[in-house]
Amino acid sequence: MKRIIYCLLLLAGSLFFFSCKMQQDRKEPAPGIFTGKEGEIKLVVLDPGHFHASLLQKFPQKQVNDTVFVYAPGGSELDQYLASIEGYNSRSENPTAWIGIVYSGKDYLEKMIKERRGNVVILAGNNLKKTDYIYQSINAGYDVLSDKPMAINSENFRLLESAYDSARTRNVYLYDVMTERYDILNTLTRELVNNVELFGELQEGTPESPSVKMESVHHYYKEVSGSVLVRPAWFYDVEQQGEAIVDVATHMVDLINWQCFPDEVIDYRQDVKLLSASHWPTTLTLDQFCRSTGLDAFPNFLGKYLNRSLLEVYGNGKFNYQVKGKNIEVCALWNYEAPKGGGDTYSAVIKGTKATIEIVQNQEEKYVKQLYVEKEPSVTSEEFDRSIAGTVKQLQRSYPYISAKRVSDSRYRIEVPVESRKGHEDYFGYVAQKFFGYLVNRDMPEWEISNTIAKYYITTQSLEMARNR
């Protein structure tokens, strides 16, 4: 009898072990390698064709190992990346100490996957290749921090969805470099929009008069970190770089999700409705193209965009859509060069039932971005003044340097001293810190994932709509 009981217990133990093993096989275990300790994050920089790749390394972070593994095809883009890193290492103030281990060869992607030498892949480069890089890196077990855009067409979007599914299975994270959330005026806009006493509720609006309108203007020829930005020739090929609708507009769609629907899950299948979209080109002369790229002729692959010796780049687009019934308009524009004293500009209008929040950046403001709050006609001046005073007092707990200045009977400017504003290049470090925190705490919220997928559905499908008009 004892022998039978022993055999039964042995059989039960075996079945339990087998069951546990089956559960492990169905879902890979958590990597368990991120604890926040110094040097544990080992970066892999894959095909760094955009200057954003080096900006993510501009400021040292203790959690990031000084040794960085770089995999890329040889050429000028890799050379520019390495020169930027060397510049950070050799600067007199707050120098970095990066040690680059570089592999340059045609099989750079396969080599990266086979060697598995780091644990976080950094992506910033040719946008046509980027979604495949994301997918393969995720499937190889890497966490991925990717510059925008992560998808520039419908095929990319479907692959991006698959990458997120794969990331869930492998318990790794994929994160979009959304730097504009760290602009102090955008951060304050989020606070104001979600102050019910001041703002009320987001208006529904109409397609003709949306409740949210955003516009961004960029320039092909400009300076970055005090030097003229040399753009690769493929930047002017919208099949590789992506049109404005799927590139620059990514930031604006992200801000709308983040500011107007904070911490809410947006399911594109249920919550998003696309209404209209259009696009049109910016024309460049050969001289302008050469000035921007350092080349002396249009390469053959851009021949399909030439019209009477002028290069037509579809760097402009506008689209209208709805999220949870709210009407939204986004416009992205590319000019060749900014006017004297100017630069890239951004404007936004968000209409509430009690007040409208507006960001203005134009010649009248000397191209300095400014934040305004204007009351709705139904709100009395006394009520508006009281709400402004209370809101600013509350915000000063976190942002002690801000104040409010009345500019008309119905309008205030939220004053943010220029010296208290961080620059665009600083935002990359903040994004990296946020991502590294998620890696340690394993607490990336569901809305970050669903809203990123919704964002790329909106941009890629709006592009399809514009092309099929």
Image (cartoon, rainbow, N blue to C red):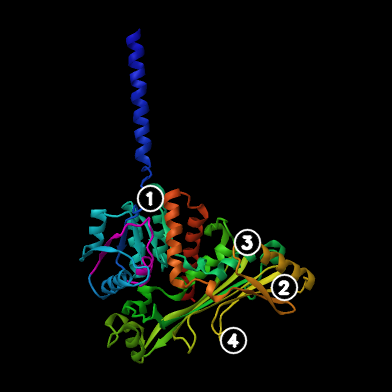
Label disc, if present, on residue 397 of the rendered structure: 3
Q: CA distance from mark 2 to mark 1?
A: 49 Å
Q: CA distance from mark 3 to mark 4?
A: 31 Å
Mark found first going from the N terminus, 2 or 4: 4
Label disc, if present, on residue 37 of the rendered structure: 1
Label disc, if present, on residue 364 of the rendered structure: 4
Identify whether 3 is placed above or below 175.
above
User: Does dot 1 land on a helix, a strand or a loop?
Assistant: loop
**Magenta stretch bounds:** 49-73
Q: CA distance from mark 1 to mark 3?
A: 31 Å
> Residue 250's spot in the image, x, y percent?
48, 69
> Residue sitting at 35 percent across and 35 percent down?
22
**Of residues 376 and 286, which is closer to you in this image?**
376
Mark found first going from the N terminus, 3 or 2: 2
At label 4, which amino acid type do we have? Glu
Q: Which residue is mark 2?
A: 375
**Of residues 434 and 3, which is closer to you in this image?**
434
At label 2, which amino acid type do we have? Lys
At label 3, which amino acid type do we have? Arg
52 magenta-colored: yes
At label 1, which amino acid type do we have? Lys
In the picture, residue 144 is in which quadrant? bottom left
> Residue sitting at 35 percent across and 62 percent down?
122
User: Does dot 2 land on a helix, a strand or a loop?
Assistant: strand
The number of numbered discs placed on residues in the rendered structure image is 4
Mark found first going from the N terminus, 2 or 1: 1
